[in-house]
Image: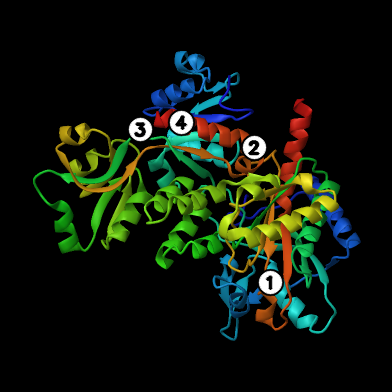
Amino acid sequence: MISPTPPGTRDVLPDEMRELRFITDRLRAVFEAAGYGEVSTPTMEYEDVLVRGDDRAAGAGYRVFDDQGRVLVLRSDMTIPIARLAASRYGDAPAPIRLSYFAHSYRAVERGRGQAREFLQAGIELIGRPAPEGDAEVIATVLDALEAAGLRRHRIGLGDGSLYRTLLASLDVPLEERMPLLEALSRRDLVGLESRVRGLDLSERACELLTRLPTLRGGPEILDRADGPVAAALDDLRACHELLVERGVADRVILDLGLVRELGYYTGAVFEVYDPAVGFAIGGGGRYDDLLGRFGRALPACGLALDVQRVHVAGAEEERLDDGR
Amino acid sequence: MTAGENLTIAVPRGALMGETLDLLERLDVDVAEVRSNERKLLFAESRIVTMRPSDVPTYVERGAADIGITGKDVLLEQSEREVYELLDLGYGRCRMIVAAREGDDAMGESLRRLGTVRVATKYPRVAAAHFGATGRQAEIVEVKGSVELAPLTGLADAIVDLTATGRTLDENRLEEREEIVVCTARLIANPVVHKLKAAALDSLVERMREATCA
C-alpha cells in the first residue's frame, strides 16, 4: 500500500541523506570556524511575534489555533525567529553576535509547480555589525562555505533593497505610481516597467534612470554608469565591494542594481546566491537594521540563508557538466 | 551562428514561429534547418529548441532554455513564472477579448437573474482576473479546444479568447463585447542567466530592439 505525504513534502532515503549530510556538515564546519554558533528555535511561533517582524508574517502559509485560542504559525523563514531570540536571550551580550542555523521552514505552494512546502535552510545571521563590514563578512563566509560543500561555480548577487524606492522618491514620482512600478520590478516585468515609466510625466533623464538602473549588473564598473540621486546607496555598495576585494572573493560577486527581495524587513544590502548549473537562486538574504529594534534591542544586522536541497541539486548539476566535458 | 554567446533560445511553434525565425535570421542566426524540419525539436548547432508557446515560460524558468519568445497572453496566464520579461517584440499582435452570441444578451441576463456569468476560456486566470476587476461574479469553465463552441451549445454565456482578425468569431456568429488587453510577442529570460550571462544577454536585447524597431 502506498500512503501519500502532503504535496510539497518528501521523504529522504539514505543515499540522498548521506549527500545532504555531507553538505550540511561542511557548511556547519565553516560557519563554526567563522564564529557562528548554531542555534535552534521552535518550528511554531506566535503569529503576532512574526507579524512584528513583517506585516505578512514573512509569507507564512500555515496557521493553527492552540488550546488557548492563540494563533500559531509554522515559521516561513528563520530571520524573524532569530531576531526574536537574539533580542530576548542576548539582551545585554556584547555585539557582534554571530549565529547559524540548520532548520526546516514552511511556505504555501502553488499547485503543479513542484515547489517545496517544507524546505531545509542553512544560514547565518550577523547581529551588531553594520554595513559595509557586516555585509562583506556574511558574503565571504557563505562563499567559503559553499566551496567547502563542493560547489565551484557559485556566485552571489549584491544589490540594495532600498535603491529603487530612493530613486522614485528623489525623482518626485507621484506616490500612487510608486507601488505599481515596484511591483513591475519585483515581477521582473521590464517591458511593463518601461511602458509605465513612459506614461508618467517625467523628464527624459528621469525615464532613462528609472528604466536603466534595474538593468545594471556586473562588476564594479556598473557603479560608475549609475549616478544621480542614488549616489549614497552606490557608495555603500562600492565600500562593500572594496572589502570583498580585500577578502579576495570579489570575482564571485555580481553587483546588481535591479535586485529586489520580497520580504519587507530589508533595509539595505540584499543578496541572492546563484550557480550557473541551475536556473534558480539557491539562497538569499540581506540587511535588516530595523528588525531587532522591534523586539527590544536595536542592533544593525544582516544574514543569508541557503536552500540546502537546491545547493545539493546545483552540486549534482555541476558534476554532470564536468562529466560532460 | 547562434543568438548570442552560449544562449539557448526557446522558439514557439505555431502562429509566432514564422516571425520569430525571421527576427532571428535578421540577427544572423542560422535558422534554415529549423524552417526545413517540421518534426525535429532541438537544433544544437544554432542552440534553438522549439515547443508550444505555453511551454516556453516553463523551460526558461527552469533554465532548460536561457531565453525564449512567447506571447504576452501566455505570460499573463502564467504570471507566477519567475522569468524576466525583457522586450516587447511587437509582432504576433492580437487581442484578448470577451465575446458572446450575436443577437441576445445571455451574459447580462445571467448576471441579472442568476448573479453570475458563465465564461468558457483557455485562459482561466486572465478571465477570472478580468471579471473580478470589473466587479462581476463569474463561473470560469476551462476548455482546451475551440472555445467558440461553448456559447453555441449553452456550456457558457460568454468566452474569453484571443482574436487577431475576428474571422473565427464571425463564422460562429459571436461578437466582441469587451477588450481585455492587447498581446504581442515578448522576449523572456531565465533570472539566473540574466545575472550570470549579463553581457551576452544585453547585447542580444540591444540587437533585437534595433531589429524590431527597424
Residue identifier under label 2: B197
Give coordinates of residue A290: x percent, y percent: 66, 74
Residue A289: assigned label = 1
Specify whether residue A187 is in view. no
Q: Is A125 in front, or is A256?
A: A256
Chain label for disc 1: A
Give the secondary structure at mark 3.
loop
Mark whose residue sits in front, 1 or 4: 4
Give coordinates of residue A270: x percent, y percent: 66, 59
Chain label for disc 3: B
- Mark 1 vs mark 4, CA separation in Å: 44 Å
Tell me: residue B156, above or below residue B15. Answer: below
Give the secondary structure at mark 4.
helix
Task: Check contact, mark 1 vs mark 4: CB within 8 A.
Answer: no
Give the mark nearer the N terminus: 4 vs 2: 2
Give the mark nearer the N terminus: 4 vs 3: 3
Residue identifier under label 3: B92
Residue identifier under label 4: B210
